[in-house]
Amino acid sequence: QVQLVESGGGLVQAGGSLRLSCAASGHTFNRYASGWFRQAPGKEREFVATISWNGDYLAYADSVKGRFTISRDNAKNTVYLQMKSLKPEDTAVYYCAARRFTRVATTSAEYDYWGQGTQVTVSS
């Protein structure tokens, strides 16, 4: 079993930066691919970024490509999402997820474990 806890959300002005962290429990986490998703009010949860178990493979949603960077530190059982040049449309609850496979995935149905989410609000 894996438990995920996100942190690092908050209120930031447009153009600013935030770094989200996802701390995982469970000794098998470092063999799992991970991802970040987000859900804005009234919208469906959407894919943001994903990283393979060893960090060799990454994928991003077009809307965040070039602004967001996903990374992981398996020694710390933590996945990060560095967000730069934030826009008001990035406002959402951000969720960390993990799947019991090493390869990346871009749909929420492919993930087995989820965190509780952290709010990111970008003001204009």
Image (spheres, rainbow, N blue to C red):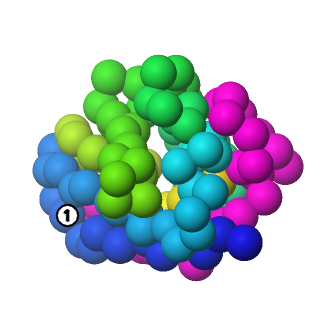
Would residue 77 be counted in the magenta stretch? no
Element at badge 1? Answer: strand
Q: Amino acid at mark 1?
A: Val
Residue 40 position in % (x across, y down): 57, 62
Residue labelled with disc 1: 12
Residue at horizontal 72 percent and vertical 49 percent from the top:
99
Residue 31 left/right relative to 7 = right
Residue 93 position in % (x across, y down): 51, 67
Quadrant housing residue 31: top right
Residue at horizontal 71 percent and vertical 64 percent from the top:
113
Would residue 116 be counted in the magenta stretch? yes
Q: Which residues are magenta?
A: 99-124
From this view, report whether residue 79 is shown above or below residue 68. Answer: below
Label 1 environment density (alpha carbons within 10 Å; few <14, some 14–19, many ≥20): some
Q: Residue furthest front?
A: 27
From this view, report whether residue 35 is shown above or below residue 69. Answer: below
Residue 105 position in % (x across, y down): 71, 34
Viewer-side residue, 73 vs 34: 73
